[in-house]
Image (cartoon, rainbow, N blue to C red):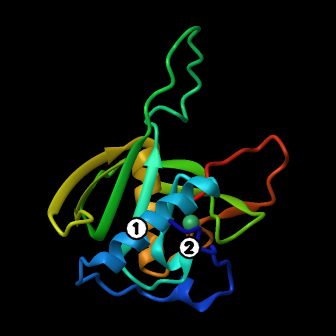
Amino acid sequence: MTLREIVTLPEPVLRRKAKPVTKFDKKLQTLIDDMIETMRDAPGVGLAAPQVNVSEQLAVIEYAEGEDEDEEVEGAQPKPKKLYVIINPEIIKASEEKVMGIEGCLSIPGLIGEVERHEMIQIKALNRHGKPIKLKVDGWMARIFQHEIDHLNGVLFTDLSKRIWKPTAEEETPLD
Ligand code: ZN
């Protein structure tokens, strides 16, 4: 596996609508493994292919549900992280309820902002072997999925945010 370079604005690939993946070959498997390694190294909770300069509909996400909740229970085991690989994803259902949260992006270093997202979404996609999958996610996980799917359409969180600022040292935000 190889670490890939994460591109940042104003790299044009970040603004392009990515092409659907059609070949589930060895080259794709290598790209997926590289993206997982690059996401973990960053570290980030998600990474979309355009962020490593590949204009294809592919994203990886790794996050432990409940990580955003402040529930420090003594002796509690850390929640296991879940890894998702989504290809050609499509949002098929979204909750009417929206929630505000603070996002950052590995491709826009030094800025964070408030973004309103659907609290729950259902998506259909293909897994890394081209098999159809359906997922229902909510909370922070749903936010990460929406952030990544936006990347595949050339949309960045700064397009949706009404308030953007430079984070202070205490403001830690999961990046993707
Ligand atoms: Zn991002």
Mark 2: which amino acid? Leu
Give residue 66's position: percent from left, percent from top: 47, 31
State the residue lying farthest toward the right.
169
Position of 94 relative to 153 (above/below): above
Where is ligand 1, by quadrant? bottom right
The part of the image, by quadrant, that contains residue 150 is bottom left
Does residue 163 appear anywhere in the picture?
yes
Position of 70 relative to 157 (above/below): above
Report the residue at 34% width, 70% height from top: 29
Is the C-beta of the residue carrying label 1 under 8 Å from the nearest atom of ligand 1? no
Give residue 162's position: percent from left, percent from top: 64, 64
Position of 142 relative to 79 (above/below): below
- Secondary structure of the residue carrying tag 1 is helix
> Residue 144 has which mark?
none
- Secondary structure of the residue carrying tag 2 is loop
State the residue lying farthest toward the top.
74
Side of 54 relative to 120 (left or right):
right
Position of 65 relative to 11 (above/below): above
Count of numbered circles in the view: 2
Give residue 124's position: percent from left, percent from top: 21, 62
Report the residue at 55% width, 77% height from top: 52
Q: Residues within 10 Å of mark 1 (few under 14, many from 20)?
A: many
The part of the image, by quadrant, that contains residue 148 is bottom left
The residue that mark 2 highlights is 156
Give residue 23's position: percent from left, percent from top: 24, 83
Report the residue at 46% width, 28% height from top: 79
Quadrant showing the C terminus: bottom right
Is the C-beta of the residue carrying label 2 under 8 Å from the nearest atom of ligand 1? yes
Mark 1: which amino acid? Ile
The part of the image, by quadrant, that contains residue 88 is bottom left
